[in-house]
């Protein structure tokens, strides 16, 4: 059994995965001062770093790409060793959170991650942390290929419409069919209005997903995103942050 607690966020593009991941990370930082936290940006279109206020350095994809050229690898070092060394260097370190950015594995040159290698690397890496948060891409490639497995909580995000909830239901179907290794799976409805979730209750029931909470529509979240400001700078009493705190508590994180 792994001791680190892992949560992953999945869902259609634009439904608030990165927002939820960043707000939950802030909850962890503020609640467990001094605990070690790893954030993994597993979205090919990486932008979690911005929400966290961290500089993006290198991505795993770039390193894999670089290692395709045998001349890049120093003599006496195996390719696997070299990738592991470089991947460790690519971790962005900050006071509270370390960030690993997977990047786009189908980027220029078109290739795929050697699965085994990445899986082993992440498996080893995560044991150094108390908490691991994974912001996924809509396709859930890393979850379905099990680059990241043994997840405690998988949170599926949806926008606050009937169609959005049905779409989250389809994500849930995929999660079940590819047998993603998550201990518990919940729905988070994002951008709820003042009427809350009452009107979506029936639709949510049909998906079979258990609702853990909602994030209210929060103009400041959108505004900060536009300006590239980290969500860690949101006022402490922001509606969206308070809602993330509630979700964190309900999960027992
Ligand atoms: N609760 C919210 N209130 C206001 N704007 C939001 C909220 N959640 C997300 N947004 C905005 O919606 C857009 C998509 O959110 P994002 O978290 O990037 O989604 P994803 O990571 O799923 O693609 C961003 O511009 C973000 O600022
Ligand atoms: Mg995102």
Image (cartoon, grey):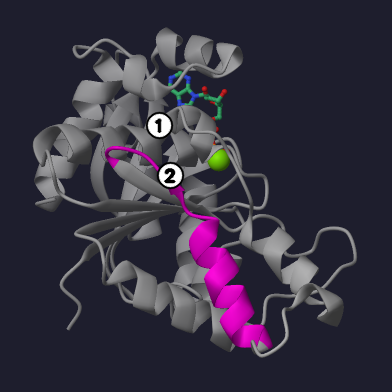
| Residue 82 on the magenta span | yes
* Mark identifier at residue 157: 2
Q: Compare marks 1 and 2 and give the one earlier in the sequence.
A: 2
| Quarter of the image where the N terminus is located | bottom left
Residue at 34% across / 15% down in the picture?
233
Q: Is mark 1 within 8 Å of ligand 1?
A: yes
| Residue 235: % across, % down | 26, 10
- The reply, left or right, for residue 233 in relation to residue 59 is left
CB atoms of marks 1 and 2 within 8 Å: yes
Question: Circle 1 sits on which residue?
Answer: 190
| Residue 213 visible in the current orientation | yes
Residue at 62% across / 78% down in the picture?
82
Front position in the image: 192 or 253? 253
| Residue 92: % across, % down | 47, 47
How many C-alpha atoms fall within 10 Å of the one at disc 2: few (<14), some, or many (≥20)? Answer: many
Compared with 17, 237 (above or below) is above
| Residue 69 visible in the current orientation | no
Residue at 44% across / 17% down in the picture?
221
Question: Magenta region: which residues?
Answer: 79-96
| Residue 62: % across, % down | 73, 59
- The reply, left or right, for residue 81 in relation to residue 26 is right
Q: Secondary structure at mark 2?
A: strand
Front position in the image: 148 or 206? 148
Compared with 93, 127 (above or below) is below
Front position in the image: 74 or 210? 74
Residue 249: image quadrant is top left
Front position in the image: 152 or 186? 152
Q: Secondary structure at mark 1?
A: strand
């Amino acid at each position: 059994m792994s001791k680190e607690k892992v949560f992953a966020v999945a869902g259609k593009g634009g439904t608030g995965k990165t927002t939820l991941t960043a707000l939950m990370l802030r909850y962890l930082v503020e609640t467990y001062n001094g605990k070690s936290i790893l954030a993994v940006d597993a979205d090919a279109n990486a932008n979690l770093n911005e929400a966290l206020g961290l500089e993006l350095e290198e991505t795993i994809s770039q390193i894999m790409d670089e290692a395709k050229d045998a001349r890049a690898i120093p003599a006496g070092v195996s390719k696997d060793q070299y990738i592991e060394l470089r991947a460790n260097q690519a971790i962005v370190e900050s006071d509270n959170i370390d960030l690993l950015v997977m990047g786009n594995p189908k980027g220029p040159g078109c290739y795929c991650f050697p699965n085994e290698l990445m899986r082993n690397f992440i498996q080893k890496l995560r044991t150094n942390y108390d908490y691991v948060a994974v912001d996924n891409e809509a396709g859930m490639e890393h979850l379905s290929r099990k680059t990241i497995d043994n997840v405690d909580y998988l949170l599926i995000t949806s926008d606050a419409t009937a169609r959005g909830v049905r779409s989250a239901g389809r994500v849930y179907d995929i999660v079940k069919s590819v047998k993603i290794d998550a201990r518990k799976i919940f729905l988070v409805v994002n951008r709820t209005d003042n009427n809350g979730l009452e009107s979506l209750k029936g639709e949510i029931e049909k998906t079979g997903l258990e609702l853990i909470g909602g994030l209210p529509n929060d103009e400041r979240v959108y505004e900060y995103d536009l300006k590239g400001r980290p969500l860690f700078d949101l006022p402490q009493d922001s509606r969206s942050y308070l809602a993330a705190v509630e979700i964190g508590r309900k999960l027992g994180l």
